[in-house]
Image: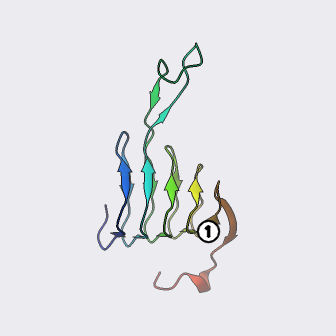
Amino acid sequence: MGKRSYIGPNAVIGLGGPVVIGEDVQIGAGLTITAESHEAGPDGSFVSGAVSRKGVTIGRRCWLGNNVSILDGVTIGEGAVIGAGSVVTRSIPAFSVALGAPARVTRSIGPADQLGR
């Protein structure tokens, strides 16, 4: 976890795989990070299947609202904003706003929005 970063209360960070949180990241209450995923085995059962641990990376200067969930294999690019209650199932580009379940990019953050950069 980088310098000057904050995670609100009631966070659950599953460290099956690596989790990297950059500097100056602000994360609201109720964060869930799941840094592993379970895959079904040949018989269709998750009990006999494999476990994948790709990890999660949150770039510097990101802002995540309350109750955000991030799944294994996701990278959130620098300066991205993730709306409250979003479920991030795939990587989010730098300087973009994403929200929803599953999270979708709704717009880019332009230079005028990048204060302090």
Mark 1 closeness class: few <14, some 14–19, many ≥20 residues within 10 Å = many
Can you tell which quarter of the image residue 10 is in?
Answer: bottom left
Expressed as whole percent of the image width and height from the top left, the position of residue 54 reads 45, 39
Residue type at the position of mark 1? Ser
Query: Where is residue 105 drawn, in percent x and y?
Result: 67, 63
From this view, report whether residue 91 is shown above or below residue 73. Answer: below
Task: Give the side of residue 12 with respect to residue 99, left or right.
Answer: left
Q: Secondary structure at mark 1?
A: strand
**Left or right placement of residue 37 versus residue 87 in this view:** left
How far across and how far down the image is residue 99, in percent?
A: 63, 64
Residue 90 shown left or right of residue 70 in the figure: right
Identify the colour scheme used: rainbow
Relative to 28, say whether 21 is above or below: above
Q: Residue at x 60, y 60 (%)?
A: 93
Quarter of the image for residue 40 reads top right
Q: Residue at x 43, y 70 (%)?
A: 28
- Point out residue 76 in the picture as x, y percentages from the top left corner: 52, 58
Q: Residue at x 54, y 81 (%)?
A: 114
**17 up-or-down from 23: above or below:** above
* Residue shown at the point (37%, 69%) measured from the top left: 8
Which residue in the structure is indicated by mark 1? 96
